Image: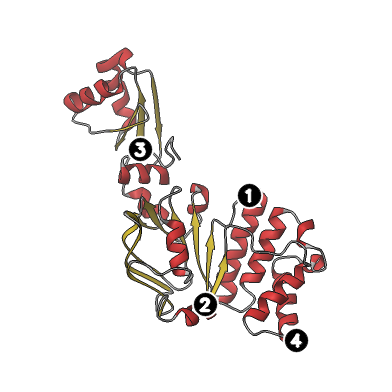
Amino acid sequence: MNAIEVAAVVHRYGERRALDDVSFDVRSGEIFGLLGPNGGGKTTLFRILTTLMAPTGGAARVLGHDCVQDARAVRAKLGVVFQSPSLDPKLRVRENLWYHGALYGLHGRDVRARTADRLARVGLTERALDKVEDLSGGLRRRVELAKGMLHDPDVMILDEPSTGLDPGARRDLWEYLGSLRERDGVTSLVTTHLMEEAERCDRLAILDEGRLVALGTPDELRARIGGAIVTLGAPDSEALQRALLDRFKIPSTLVDDTLRFEHEDAQALLPKLFAAFGAKITTVSVGRPTLEDVFIQATGHKFWSADA
């Protein structure tokens, strides 16, 4: 059974389509990423999968349960970490977990034992009696993870979980997600706009303006590009783009006044370009394909626009 199934999901806010016929599956035991810029549709899909809203069209299922028709069953199997903090800063760490456990019918010795276990897993046993307001951002995120795992969910959904964390805390977060998979077989779906986080995922769905533009492992997505990525700067980039196509039959994408294209033998091509165009080229760079290159190839624009 797939852990999550998204089938032709559409969602509108008035006339605007926040999600446009999005379909993908998340396999059991995967760490799956939803990668996209702000406004790409990640948060809307997060709300649908966590039963906070119903889609305009299509269906979403978690462990076979429909997120609209079987919302109660979905919530019982789902652990959620929101982008915005969901802890009470005036309560102690363990009290936050106790109150969360009460929402799932956990009381007495059971909730105390689970709280002790989850805090031990995230390395917070010695901070159990501290008030949340006295913790750093990274430690608060650990409490959020412990809280989300308190009722033994089979699937974790995390919305931009590393927001506000320093690099060390981010590393700890991803190590914990890996340990959840290895120890408990938990499936994780993570929304992110960070390329380095997306690289850690087993598979990715890349969203842009509500559309699914790419799906696969990071290596598979980069392999679709093929060769190296060449970037050219020029005083008149549009004229250079036309000349590049006429002279060398190379199509390119114009992104922020620079030309980008893929070529299997970029090192051999560069001397020919300089011989042909000379001063028309002011800057040049060659690099291996990245996930941002995948995004640009699929959409024709940069991951982050000036408006964003």
Where residue 169 sits: x, y (%)?
Answer: 66, 53
Dot placed on the residue nearer the N-terminal end, 4 or 2: 2
Query: Could you give the CA–CA distance between mark 3 and mark 4, rounded to whole angstroms?
Result: 60 Å
Residue identified by numbered label 1? 164
Q: Secondary structure at mark 4?
A: helix
Determine the secondary structure under disc 1: loop
Q: Are marks 2 and 1 in contact (CB under 8 Å)?
A: no
Kind of element beneath mark 2: helix
- Which of the marked residues, 2 or 1, is nearer the chain's N terminus? 2
Residue hosting label 4: 108
Q: Nearer the viewer, mark 3 or mark 4?
A: 4
- Quadrant holding the N terminus: bottom left
Sequence-first tag of 4 and 1: 4
Residue 58 x/y as whole percent: 31, 69
Which of discs 3 and 1 lies nearer the camera? The answer is 1
Q: Nearer the viewer, mark 3 or mark 2?
A: 2
Under mark 3, the amino acid is Ala
Label 3 vs 2, first from the N-terminus:
2
Give the distance between the C-alpha atoms of the residues marked 3 and 1, in whole angstroms: 33 Å
Q: Measure the alpha-carbon separation of dots 3 and 2.
A: 45 Å
